[in-house]
Amino acid sequence: MRHRYGLLLVAALVAASPSHAQGLPPGHPGAASAQPAAIEEDSVMVNPSIAPGTIHVRLVDPDGAPLPHVDVKLSSQFNKIAEGEKKTEQHVKTDDNGVAVFGGLPTGGDFNYRAVVNNGPAEYASDPIQLKPDAGVVALLHVYPVTRSVQEAGIGGILFVYVETRDDVFQFEILVRYGNRSRVSWVPEDARMELPAGFKAFKAGEAMTDVRFEEDPGHGAKLRGTFAPGQQSASFRFQVPRQGESQASFHLGLPPHIGEARFIAEAAPTMEIDVDGFEKPQVDVSQTGQRVLVTRRVAVRGQSNGLPGFTAQLSGIPTPGWGRWLAVLVASGLAALGFAASRGRLGRETQAELQERDAARAKRVLLDELVYLTRARQEERVGPSTYESARRVLVEALSRVISQNPALAKRAKRSERKKAARNAEKGSSA
């Protein structure tokens, strides 16, 4: 599906971005100095020396020192088609060595476990754990100090906006990836992202941690969760209604400390984008052959709080145009003339002649519209939904015109017989 491609594309761009590697906006006070000493990363390791059905959760501080007497929650999820889903949890405190031991746990692929520790508003969780029948597991989990200040945590992010123009809506996907190069976790308190007016169908992306976006009805989205040292991502999508216009404008406010923003739009050959403050758009082609326009803006020195919001303008959006669909009304009007003639309301021509002439005109108009619509679909100037609905209307109108004017069918048969006779004459003379 196209929206899946959108996220795959931006994820690839994130991985290749120099700003993503940097992690902080240019000019941020911590960009050059925030170089914490290397520490062992969180991990989940199978350990044959630990009894099967056992999980050891080892808690440490940023320096790797053990954290004794801390409550650890082990969440358990059982999922089997025949029995459904069941969730349980149990709590154990770490010992003097900072280790919490959970034993007697069921093994196998139907059970998933996760160790979770809370430190004030922050939540730290291990990767999902599956137990093998012949060995236990050791999960290493760091617990960091917490701040509500994005400056104290040394946070910087990169944001991608991906937009697809559909028949009746603009489909947006947003991906934000933050890097935290400090030794303190950031828990946002009022980090918001303003979305275009009238947005709807908000849906947050799935995540392995508590980092996520939540809808702020009527305004936009709120950023939630624990941004521990390292990298964290969050995504969501939404729609903005479209009325068939050939141009549109969208304003987006940004969450704090975004050092780079990229705007990517699926684009027909006639389309252009203009995003204030961004680089000149570049044309690219997706893996599926779809033409896309890509532009970006990078924070400069002095923008230590990150990029401001921006307005994006799309122009040259393919649209059938109102005149094309007025043809149906024209055809209906022509058919009505024939009906009026049959009631004796018009001129000097015989009723039958006038009715047949007007019906023939209506038929030609409808057939021409079907040809135009088919070409527009082949050239991707109209979407599949618009094509199907418009084609249905035209075919139904054509059917009514023919059914109400039997003379058209007779004329078509005569024309076919004459054509066949001409072809036969050409064949015999040859």
Image: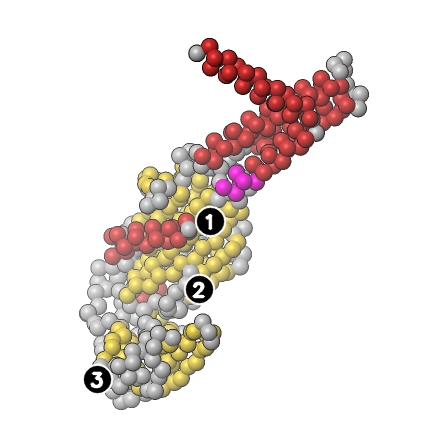
Closer mark to the observer between disc 2 and disc 3: 3
**What's under tag 2, amino acid-wise?**
Asp
Q: In this view, does 396 lie above or below 54?
A: above
Name the N-terminal-most of marks 2 and 1: 1
Closer to the N terminus: mark 3 or mark 1? 3
Q: How many labels does the image show?
A: 3
Q: Residue at x 61, y 23 (%)?
A: 413
Rendering quarter of residue 414: top right
- Residue displayed at 79% across by 21% down: 345
Query: In the rendered image, which residue does mark 2 sit on?
Result: 190
Q: Give the range drawn in magenta.
A: 384-390
Q: Is residue 136 left or right of 428 when viewed as pictured? A: left
* Alpha carbon distance from label 2 to label 1: 26 Å
Majority secondary structure of the magenta segment? helix
Q: Choose between 26 and 60: the one closer to the eye.
A: 60
Q: Name the residue under label 1.
A: 171
Q: Residue 286 location, x and y as percent?
A: 34, 44
Q: Earlier in the sequence, mark 2 or mark 3?
A: 3
Q: x, y (%) of residue 331?
A: 64, 28
The extreme front residue here reads: 428
Residue mark closest to the camera, 2 vs 1: 1
